[in-house]
Image (cartoon, helix red, strand yellow):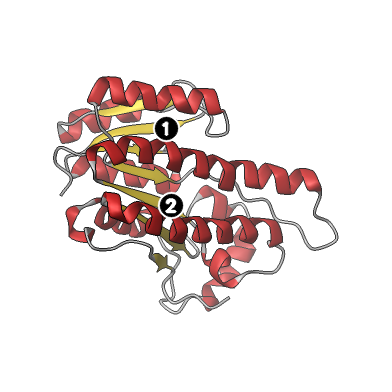
Amino acid sequence: MLNDKVALVTGASRGIGKAVVESYAQNGATVYANARTESCLDVICRDLSDKFHTEVIPLYFDVTNDTDVKNAFVRIKKEKGRLDVLVNNAGIMRDALIGMISSELIRDIFEVNVFAVANLIQLASKMMIRQRSGSIINFSSIVGVRGNIGQLAYSASKGAIIAMTKTASKELAPRNIRVNAIAPGMIDTDMFRSIGEKHVADKLGAIGMGRIGTPEDVARVCLFLASDLSEYVTGQIIGVDGATIL
């Protein structure tokens, strides 16, 4: 489904990002897999390249470092000459109740979840505009759509992603660039498990399908949005939540 396409996936060292990289490689894409920690992706990228007979290339940078991010795009352009898919997966979640939310917490969340995404969208769109094609996939959250107790700052950042997605899709549609967002519910990742096993068990009752989602559930939607099957889909916020009720 992704033969001859070049993709960049941020936050690729684990969870959803890792599953997306594997899905894209399996479907023939050349994938630049991003993480902050130097060498943490070397082995998995080599294994996926060998397994699926494509290129999975580790690309180490902090999404909040403008210089390093710009250099990453320069490298992609130099090596491949194009970028077909950007997946803005990197993000952080820190919870706090109203009255306990510090300015520092808000800044930290928005720096990664909002400001970095805006920068990546702009840099990717510059390359995509020249080739007059591309798909940008952002990550919101079910709490960005519906809100949730204890997540004022995090849900606000994911709500901002929805607004950016809708605006960017309108601005870039005349250039044949699609911009969509995925809003996962409760997905079995390290981030979700960090709330504690008791809380995980308690939340199962809120999921209509009766199970926690997997990173692969989300990766399949990412595959659709990256492929030509979604060539007339833009400005959409796609929930992957198994009918979760918050």
Image point (37%, 33%), residue name: 33
Give the image quarter of residue 243. bottom left
Residue type, numbered disc 1: Asn
Image point (62%, 69%), residue name: 147
Pointer 1: what residue? 34
Residue 40 is situated, as x and y percent measured from the top left of the image, at 45, 26
* Comparing labels 2 and 1, the label whose residue is closer to the camera: 2
Upstream in sequence: badge 2 or badge 1: 1
Pointer 2: what residue? 138
Q: How many marks?
A: 2
Residue 185 is situated, as x and y percent measured from the top left of the image, at 49, 65
Compared with 97, 82 (above or below) is: above
Give the image quarter of residue 46. top left
| Callout 1 secondary element | strand
Give the image quarter of residue 25. top left
Compared with 47, 213 (above or below) is: below
Tell me the CA gap for discs 2 and 1.
15 Å
- Quick one: 198 or 89, which is closer to the camera? 89
- Quick one: 47 or 21, which is closer to the camera? 21
Compared with 27, 51 (above or below) is: above
Compared with 101, 131 (above or below) is: above
Residue 246 is situated, as x and y percent measured from the top left of the image, at 58, 75
Residue 162 is situated, as x and y percent measured from the top left of the image, at 50, 61
Image point (45%, 65%), residue name: 212
- Quick one: 152 or 23, which is closer to the camera? 152
| Callout 2 secondary element | strand
Whether residue 7 is visible, yes or no, is no
- State the mark number for residue 101: none
Mark 1 Cα shell of 10 Å, populated few (<14), some (14-19), many (≥20):
many
